[in-house]
Image (cartoon, rainbow, N blue to C red):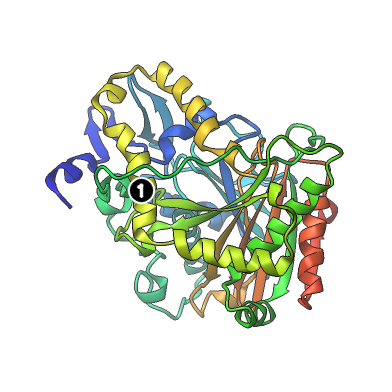
């Protein structure tokens, strides 16, 4: 890392009011494009095998937020940039509600950029993308769970903070500056050719659910069956499920009463940059790959979509291709003219940019967090793990997946009344011979 990059990555500052942090390159746009529906919140849920002790969980949350001081923050407006001001008090666990990730505005004064919620045996953590990505949220929630069970006298039977449990931070450890660095600026590659522009994508057309409602449908599959099906096709799980998602979008595009003006359906696949660029950051550090199909060429079979998803992923999922995105996204905040533009004008520009380079070029997304692992002393106390994607008023329905023990857990979050996309997706999986058990949140409460 050169000296210029090193200067840009110094994100923590301290003045007479205390510690404050700059937003990372991905988070900087979020305050301008979020509201109480498009909250930017994604969610991790843990259902334990027994009722949660609320008092112990609050103690564990206080200890964990002290270990993650760069998470225990509120959003503030400066003259030129938003910044994150550290809270003096510890957060408190809130009662959970039926609709996750809703009725929460990070722009409201005094609002933290995450919250922990509790209902019976279920612990949930909701995090704004202005603060972190899935990897950072996992690290916080795993550390919270480890601390909660430690207070209950449970031995994790593993060395925390090391090896495959390196993301569970020792609660008495001292936060390192590297944990909250801006990975995009640290690994800024310099000027590179811009990525090719993406065409506007077709979006679902369906009546919206009432404000404040976010439907969650979760399916549990047998992990070994899904892996076997992917291996049979010489593709990954992400590519297999991405093809099923594209096929569902294709069916809905073809079912439109009139041919849509937008001829492309596209699916976003987030990519964790930590696999390519070294960082300890618990802040945002991900980009994306688009699986895209031109419907003017006609419908494709599932086998074709699976094969094409595989090759599109292979072409784009490499450091050089991703570096072009990184250079474009991180380069703007280094521009002297951009840095001197007042914040209210930056907000306007951010909304325009988000419309052009953000969700208007997506028909949906599916995020695969991979295998979720807890230490052997703790894992038996956790019955299920779920990851719920952030709500989007543009794509309306999105999906996420992770594996836990022998299960593959796929979750859809939707702002629409229609469940047709989910139905088509799970019907395809069943047609492949996979066992699929589906439950809907609004029918289980």
Q: Quadrant of residue 276?
A: bottom left
Residue for point 47% across, 68% down: 150
Q: Residue at x 67, y 35 (%)?
A: 393
Compare residues 243 and 260 and report the one nearer the observer: 260
Using residue 42 as the reference point, say whether residue 350 is left or right of it: left
Position of 70 with respect to 16 (left or right) is: right
Check disc 1 and report the residue beneath it.
324
Residue 92: percent from left, percent from top? 53, 44
Residue at figure coordinates x 47%, y 77% from the top left? 155
Q: Is residue 326 left or right of residue 212?
A: left
Q: Could you tell me residue 202's position as x and y percent? A: 68, 40
Residue lying at the far left in this picture: please name it. 3
Residue pictured at 47% horizontal, 57% vertical: 271
Residue 212's spot in the image, x, y percent?
73, 35
Work out whether residue 169 can be spotted. Answer: no
| Above or below 179: residue 241 | below
Confirm whether residue 256 shows in the render. Answer: yes
> Where is residue 398 shown, x and y percent of the image?
66, 49
Q: Locate residue 224: give its quadrant.
A: bottom right
Instruction: Tell me the element at label 1.
Output: helix
């Amino acid at each position: 890392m050169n000296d210029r990059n090193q200067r840009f990555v110094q994100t923590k500052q301290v003045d007479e009011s205390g510690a404050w942090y700059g937003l990372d390159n991905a988070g900087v746009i979020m305050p301008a494009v979020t509201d109480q529906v498009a909250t930017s919140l994604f969610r991790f849920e843990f259902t334990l095998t027994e009722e949660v002790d609320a008092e112990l969980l609050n103690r564990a949350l206080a200890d964990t937020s002290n270990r993650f001081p760069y998470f225990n923050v509120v959003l503030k407006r400066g003259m030129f940039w938003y910044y994150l001001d550290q809270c003096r008090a510890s957060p408190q666990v809130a009662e959970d509600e039926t609709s996750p990730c809703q009725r929460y505005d990070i722009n409201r004064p005094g609002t933290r950029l995450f919250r922990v919620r509790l209902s019976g045996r279920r612990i949930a953590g909701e995090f704004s993308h202005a603060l972190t990505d899935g990897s950072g949220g996992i690290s916080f929630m795993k550390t919270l769970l480890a601390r909660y069970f430690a207070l209950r006298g449970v031995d994790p039977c593993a060395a925390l903070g090391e090896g495959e449990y390196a993301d569970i931070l020792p609660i008495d450890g001292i936060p390192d500056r590297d944990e909250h660095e801006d990975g995009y600026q640290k690994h800024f590659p310099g000027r590179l050719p811009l990525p090719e522009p993406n065409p506007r994508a077709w979006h679902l057309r369906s009546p919206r659910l009432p404000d404040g409602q976010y439907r969650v449908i979760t399916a549990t599959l047998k992990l070994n069956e899904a892996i076997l099906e992917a291996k049979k096709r010489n593709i990954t799980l992400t590519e297999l499920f991405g093809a099923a998602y594209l096929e569902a979008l294709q069916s809905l595009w073809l079912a439109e009463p009139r041919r849509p003006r937008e001829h492309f359906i596209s699916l976003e696949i987030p990519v964790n940059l930590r696999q390519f660029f070294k960082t300890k950051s618990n802040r945002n550090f991900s980009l994306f790959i688009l699986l895209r199909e031109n419907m003017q060429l006609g419908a494709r079979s599932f086998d074709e979509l699976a094969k094409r998803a595989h090759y599109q992923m292979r072409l784009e999922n490499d450091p050089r291709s991703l570096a072009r995105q990184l250079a474009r996204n991180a380069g703007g905040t280094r521009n002297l003219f951009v840095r001197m533009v007042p914040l209210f004008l930056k907000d306007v520009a951010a909304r325009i940019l988000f419309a052009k380079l953000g969700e208007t070029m997506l028909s949906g997304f599916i995020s695969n967090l991979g295998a979720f692992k807890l230490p052997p002393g703790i894992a038996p106390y956790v019955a299920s793990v779920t990851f719920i994607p952030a709500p989007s008023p543009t794509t309306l329905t999105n999906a996420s997946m992770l594996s836990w023990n022998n299960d593959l857990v796929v979750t859809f979050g939707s702002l629409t009344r229609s469940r047709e996309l989910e139905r088509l997706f799970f019907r395809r999986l069943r047609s492949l011979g996979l066992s699929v058990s589906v439950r809907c949140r609004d029918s289980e409460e």
